[in-house]
Image: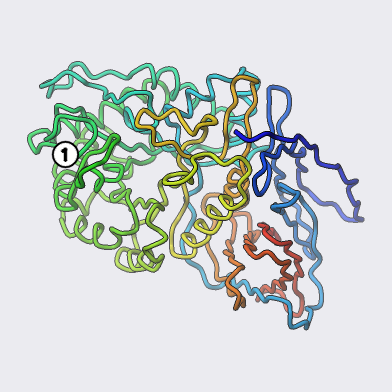
Amino acid sequence: MKKFIDCSLIIVPAIFYSFTISYASASDCVRRYYGESSFVCVCNATYCDSTPSVDELVPPDQAIVISSTRNDSRFQTHFLQFDIPSNESTVFQITVNASKTYQAIIGFGGAFTDAAGINIAKLSLPAQQLLLSSYFGTLGIEYGIGRVPIAGSDFSTYPYSYDDFPGDTTLSNFSLTEEDLVFKIPFINWAKTISSKPIKLFSSPWSGPAWMKSNNDFSGFGHLLPENYQPWAEYFAKFFEEYRKHDINFWALTAQNEPNNGRVPGCSWNCMGWSPEDQALFVGQNLGPTLASKGFGDVKIMVVDDQRTFMPSWPKTVLADPEANKYVSGFGVHWYANNVVPPSVLTSTHEAFPDRFILATEACNGPYEEPVIMGSWERLESYAHDIIEDLNHWVAGWVDWNLVLDEDGGPNWAENYVDAPIIVNNTIDEFYKQPMFYAMGHFSKYIPEDSIRIELEMSDSTRSLFGTAFLRPDGKRSVVILNRSDEERTISLADVDRIDVTLTLICPARSIHTIVYV
């Protein structure tokens, strides 16, 4: 861990206008530098920075801009006036058109893994409250989705299932574990009380019990034995039943986390292989009917939950099965092959199945490189760019991986350490908001559930500016702009519903901005 320098932001007096602006200002980030490209924001039991929220009254001739920059700011708020457009040739043009609409947003969020809960629990109760409020509260970035592993994942301290009794096909020994009762369920329920809206929870299995599988192991090359398809479907139902006893209900599930992992040799963490043909059979003949008969027919089933590599071929194979087709509501995608697979495959999938949603169900920085980089602006950019790219190709939401990790990027029994938007240092009761946290917030806070993507056209021959636009349920428009250039960019934003006026936004080098206006 590199040495750090603490800095507090200088508080600049607010400029007061003659009209009323209804928004909640944010408390400032306490900066700490670790010798990387940017800084983290330090939180503890008594203080944490917050996120500005935009309320009902936005002046009709104004826009509120929330900005984060590599050099010096997080969620800094200022105002822009719609005015006569500039004719300067150096200005980049953006046009927003709400008459052209695309997909509705499901939401944004992260995963309640064992590792996340273990790290949150190491903090004092006041620090835990501030951490969960940072993610789910009205003064936070207001996540609306939570992913919950079914039993263990690699981000557990050991591999396990809910029934490690060989041959127990009736699941008479099925039971939740300490990980659920201490590190998942309490924090999920706490987040629910903090949130001003329902949290959409979806579950994902990494592996069935070892005895149900062809290789009798949680990891490695192996698949679910066909004779255990029905017990495995019952296993899902029992998971939902047990969580319901703790007042936790699920919006959706994925049939398998990264089903291709168990089909290739060498996977060193929890996995279970499926072909799309076998998954179609399981969903159509076992999982779907079993959930319906047990009172969980409203839980949406997602398939794929793997890399773009398998889009749209995997959905096409699964939905070609008429029984599976009845039960599948959407497709989950991960980001780990996005550097080699174009986003056009997402559009192709939407065009093939316009009545099913696509959700980005997992992403993280750190695999195959330094796991945790404290203050990496580049990792903010990788998140923000991927979110924009996905949203602009019909993806309905974006879910990060672990909500919280430690300074090593764990715990992880398979030593598959990675980064997270919040890093915990329990020895001094602090947690650190990485730049990635603010990347998530620029979307999750200002593009609420049921927002509709609208057309955004941008002129940028340098390919350093990226953007997306949404019409919110309250009638406001939210536009997110990412500047990955090392140079300042001036943007002129026009809305086809506003004649002869534009917004002029100066985007500092390496910055991200959310613009909200009526």
How many numbered callouts? Answer: 1
Q: Which residue is drawn at 28% across and 49% down?
A: 303
* Rendered image quadrant of residue 160: top left
Q: Is residue 144 left or right of residue 96?
A: left
Q: How is the image coloured?
A: rainbow
Residue with the mark numbered 1: 222
* Rendered image quadrant of residue 231: top left
Q: Residue at x 71, y 47 (%)?
A: 74
Q: Is residue 283 left or right of residue 485?
A: left
Q: Camera-side residue: 65 or 294?
A: 65
Q: In this view, does 108 lie to the left or right of 208?
A: right
For the view shown, which residue lies furthest in the left direction? 227
Residue 389 place in picture, x, y as percent: 49, 62
Question: Taking 410 as reference, is 474 above or below it?
Answer: below
- Say which amino acid is labelled 1: Gly
Q: Say which element carries label 1.
A: loop
Residue 317 place in picture, x, y as percent: 19, 59
Residue 273 place in picture, x, y as percent: 20, 43
Q: In this view, does 198 lie to the left or right of 511?
A: left
Q: Residue at x 30, y 61 (%)?
A: 311
Screen quadrant of the N terminus = top right
Q: Which residue is drawn at 77% across and 39% down?
A: 28
Screen quadrant of the C terminus = bottom right
What is the crowding at mark 1: few (fewer than 14 residues within 10 Å), some, or many (at least 20)? many
Residue 391 place in picture, x, y as percent: 49, 60
Question: Taking 181 as reference, is 450 above or below it?
Answer: below
